[in-house]
Image: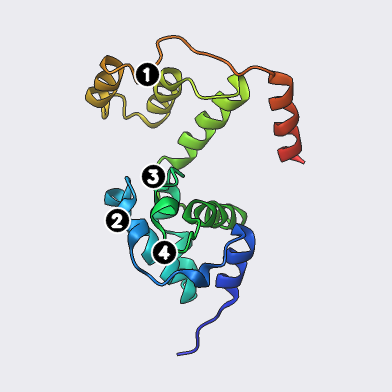
Amino acid sequence: MKVDHSFFEEVSAKSGQDLSRCFHCMCCSGGCPVAHGMDYLPNQILRMIQLGMKKEVLESRAIWLCIGCYACVTECPNRVHIPYMMDALREIALTEEVKVGEKDIWAFHREFLKQVHKRGRIYELEFMARYKLATGNLFQDAAMGMKMFRLGRLELLPSSVKHKEIMKKIREACDE
């Protein structure tokens, strides 16, 4: 079987990463805090890219579940930047209008961007309330939310970034 390397080259170029540096030690997957929810682990996604499995990768849940926490980058002995790779994959999936593998992801992204546009940062309580209303999963994570609130991990009142005019210029530049 001959492998089509065009997908590998496209993802490498868009992510700015030399994905051939990965020797599949699985450190990225071992350190990933959301790996349990993924259909394919980060190292498996990378291997699938190397094998030209474009459809399977772009339709996977994993590319949408990556939270960009950089745990994988700190664990990787070759410093392959998985979050950059996942961003590139999401961009390709959106451009090619691929069927998204993660239910409700559009509602999440819409609410996230609304929050950033409104305040320059996320106000978690409003963000999660709007997301829950949009998806109809009102009480799915209520216990975890209450625990986070008790531990002081959720702010009661929203805050805003300084220099909103700079944030506006950044958004406008991204829209061009």
Q: Residue 45: which numbered mark, if any?
A: 4
**Residue kind at label 2, given as amino acid type:** Gly
Give the image location of residue 160, x and y in percent. Answer: 57, 15
- Image quarter of the C terminus: top right
In the image shown, does 152 or 97 lie closer to the viewer?
152
**Residue kind at label 4, given as amino acid type:** Ile
Give the image location of residue 70, x and y in percent. Answer: 45, 46
Distance of mark 2 from mark 1, alpha carbons? 28 Å
Which residue bears the numbered disc 3? 103
The 10 Å Cα crowd at callout 1, few under 14, some 14 to 19, many 20 or more, is some
Identify the mark nearer the N-term, 4 or 2: 2
User: In terms of secondary structure, where does tag 3 sit?
Assistant: loop
**Residue kind at label 3, given as amino acid type:** Lys
Quadrant housing residue 147: top left
Q: Is residue 114 left or right of residue 37?
A: right
Give the image location of residue 25, x and y in percent. Answer: 34, 67
